[in-house]
Image (cartoon, grey):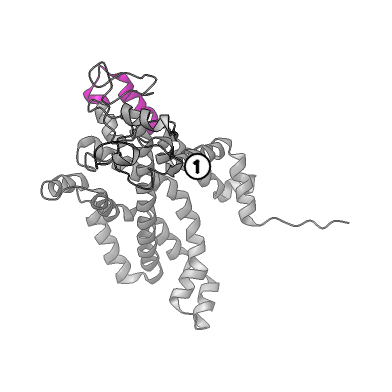
Amino acid sequence: MTLFVHPSINQLRWQRFKQHRRGYWSLWLFGLCFLLSLFSELIANDKPILIYYQNNYYSPLLYTYPETTFGGELESQTNYLDPIIQQTINQQGWMLWPLVRNSYDSLVYNTDSTFPTPPSAQHWLGTTDAGFDVLANLLYGFRLSILFAMLVTLCTTIIGVTIGAIQGYYGGKLDLFGQRFIEIWSGMPQLFLIIMLSSVIRPNIWWLFAITVLFGWMGLVGVVRAEFLRTRNFDYIRAAKALGVSDSKIMRRHIFPNAMVATLTYLPFILCGAITALTTLDFLGFGMPLETPSLGRLLLQGKNNLQAPWLGISAFIMVATLLSLLIFIGEAVRDVFDPIKGIKN
């Protein structure tokens, strides 16, 4: 006789998530793309991964070597795309190159046509009007956008959940003044503020991060506040208060797990919004510095170079695919935590 062990609620949710085929495969595809982007230096780089020269091994990705190391005449950093350097190394050893022999900031010199050049065997998605490889910029720009959005999502979630929990649990004048502040703050023209600050401050990744978090934390306040307002008067919460349990412990152990359901369903959409915000700012010219790989700047390249359709098409497909995957994942997570659909299943 075998005993039936009922799976935990998290196992049931995972099974329901796997049944949502579109969201499930979107999660796997997004995870694979993000994992590959983390190793962008090993996929697209103008430096070899490993060099064997004169019975010695060299790692250009980790260390900087002068040309004299490989038989050159200059003490400057080695240009591994130089045909003379390549010939010298190959005569007395070998080089292990990445799949794409260009980084996001590698200027292309060996071209017979003006920039932007069309896709070729050397540059699979062509080059920009400044002479940079499009595929390398897409790869590095994808990683930067995801890491930026994840960091923004983490910080805005912590701030929004904390403020929403305090407002909902204590209520009264604290909740009243908090809601009025949020109404005023949410009415601030974020784009105009960024444009004005850009005239006095040179934009960088951390500056954009601070501005995005400053205006992005309000998204979760409403749902968390509503959950705390609903739960704070339940009998088990009153019993915990009567037993002398501290407010922080009640909020953390007894109310916050209920609010996490609504929070988790919003996370993919917050992530999607952060990526859209960064891409929009870069497209408008108020984003990251010019030397930074950017999906928004590639979209701007496509708009400014209509005679080179590969620029706009490549950037559009990358941004559209990324946002679509996140939306599909968010829809699946929302359905998993939906109690009505849980009862039907």
> Is residue 306 highlighted in magenta?
yes
Q: Position of residue 124 (x, y in %)?
A: 39, 23
- Which quadrant is the N terminus positioned in? bottom right
Compared across the picture, whether 166 is left or right of 237 comes to: left
Quadrant of residue 71 within the rendered picture: top left
**Could you tell me if residue 233 is visible in this image?**
no
Q: Give the range drawn in magenta.
A: 302-320
Q: Where is residue 108 in the image (x, y as percent from the top left)?
A: 27, 27
Quadrant of residue 305 within the rendered picture: top left
**Could you tell me what secondary structure mostly forms the magenta stretch?**
helix
Name which residue lies at 47% across and 53% down.
264
- CA neighbours of label 1 inside 10 A, class few (<14), some (14 to 19), many (20+): few
Q: Name the residue under label 1.
A: 31
**Image height of 310 relative to 245, above or below:** above
Q: What element carries label 1?
A: helix
**Could you tell me if residue 121 is visible in this image?**
yes
Name which residue lies at 22% across and 42% down.
289
Q: What's the amino acid at mark 1?
A: Gly
**Image height of 44 relative to 307, above or below:** below
Which residue is at the far right? 1
Q: Which residue is at the front of the view, 103 or 194? A: 103
- Which quadrant is the C terminus positioned in? top right
> Is residue 115 highlighted in magenta?
no
